[in-house]
Image (cartoon, grey):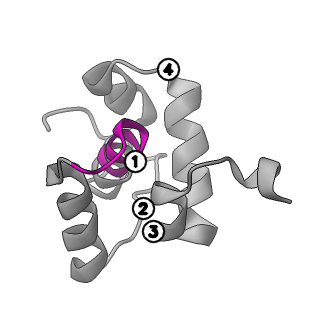
Amino acid sequence: MEGERRAGTAAVAIDSQVRDRLMRTMASVKSEVRAVLRARIVLAAADGLTNGAIARELDVSVNTVRKWRRRFAPLGLRVVRRATSPAATT
């Protein structure tokens, strides 16, 4: 993805195993559409793109990007494939 990087936007840190799992989620025809979107958001964030650049690239709101960037940090891959929001399960 081509896009902007801003010094104030921290990249999401992922290792090669997590990156591979996210790439497989994106490539699988069995993945839910929302899981693919979440994977794309996290990968773009890991590449250092700003929330605005990711939102434009994926045609979603900046708030959606912020939400998944924020949720990925504590939950990792579980949040990408989770069927419901964390708030709904607590």
Q: Which residue is mark 2?
A: 12
Residue type at mark 3 is: Leu
Label 1 to label 3, Cα distance in Å? 10 Å
Q: Which residue is mark 3?
A: 77
Left or right for 67, reference 55: right
Q: Does residue 73 belong to the magenta stretch?
A: no
Residue with the most extreme right position: 90
Q: Nearer the viewer, mark 3 or mark 2?
A: 3
Q: Secondary structure at mark 2?
A: loop
Q: Does residue 34 belong to the magenta stretch?
A: yes
Label 4 to label 2, Cα distance in Å? 18 Å
Magenta-drawn stretch, dominant element (helix, strand or loop): helix
Viewport quadrant of the C terminus? bottom right
- Bounds of the magenta span? 30-40
The image position of residue 55, as x and y in percent, is: 39, 25
Label 4 to label 1, Cα distance in Å? 16 Å
The front one of 53 and 41 is 41
Q: Earlier in the sequence, mark 3 or mark 2?
A: 2
Packing grade of label 4 (10 A; few <14, some 14-19, many >=20) is few
Residue type at mark 1 is: Ala
Q: Earlier in the sequence, mark 4 or mark 1?
A: 1
